[in-house]
Amino acid sequence: MRRFTEGSGGRPTPAVPAELLTLMDKLAGPPEFWDRPDGDFGPLSDLYELDVEARQRANSLYRHGSKALGRDELSTAADWLGQAAAAGHPGALFRLALGSSPCEGAAAGVSHARLSAHLP
């Protein structure tokens, strides 16, 4: 069985309609400020003395932790965000600080007691 993308038989590849591209952009949403896939943590990059690969791994941990936090999986979120924060990821440090502050966490919809209970 052939895959849809294999063997077009010399036919030109169909163009993606503009409407589909617009829909895909809307579904992707705006870029997340703290997502740093290139591993650039600003001034924290030099402070933690990690290579780019280690910072990129920390960014992946941050993304996983953020998604877990969004699903209300607080223990998992605290583990992943904690590992990313230990590597100096600014977004992980921010989210953990936000979750551990009673005033800020409540304002952001993050339960202070619930997230703090899972922090290392």
Image (cartoon, rainbow, N blue to C red):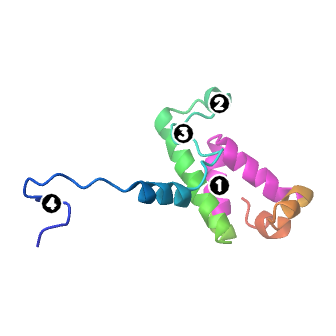
How far apart in space, not on screen, are marks 3 and 4 (Cα)? 37 Å
How far apart in space, not on screen, are marks 2 and 4 (Cα)? 43 Å
| Residue 76: image location, x then y, percent | 62, 66
**Quadrant (top left, top right, bottom left, bottom right) of the N terminus:** bottom left
How far apart in space, not on screen, are marks 2 and 1 (Cα)? 18 Å
Magenta: predominant secondary structure element? Answer: helix
Q: Nearer the viewer, residue 46 or 109?
A: 109
- Sequence-first disc among 2 and 4: 4
As drawn, the label of residue 81 is 1
Vertical arrangement, residue 100 with respect to residue 31, above or below: below
Vertical arrangement, residue 6 with respect to residue 58, above or below: below
Asked if the residue under mark 1 is in contact with the one under mark 4, i.e. CB atoms within 8 Å, the reply is no
How far apart in space, not on screen, are marks 3 and 2 (Cα)? 11 Å
> Which quadrant of the figure has residue 119?
bottom right
| Residue 36: image location, x then y, percent | 57, 41
- Sequence-first disc among 3 and 2: 2
Amino acid type at circle 4 is: Glu
How far apart in space, not on screen, are marks 4 and 1 (Cα)? 41 Å
Residue lying at 12% horizontally and 58% vertically, measured from the top left? 8
Dot 3: what SS?
A: helix
Residue under pointer 2: 42
Please check the rendered image and state whether residue 88 is part of the magenta-colored stretch, yes or no.
yes
Residue lying at 62% horizontally and 66% vertically, measured from the top left? 68
Residue under pointer 4: 6
Amino acid type at circle 3 is: Arg
Residue lying at 58% horizontally and 55% vertically, measured from the top left? 29
Q: How many marks?
A: 4
Amino acid type at circle 1 is: Leu
Dot 1: what SS?
A: helix
User: Is 2 positioned to the left or the right of 19 in the image?
Assistant: left
Asked if the residue under mark 1 is in contact with the one under mark 2, i.e. CB atoms within 8 Å, the reply is no
Q: Select label 2 or label 4 by which is in front.
A: 4
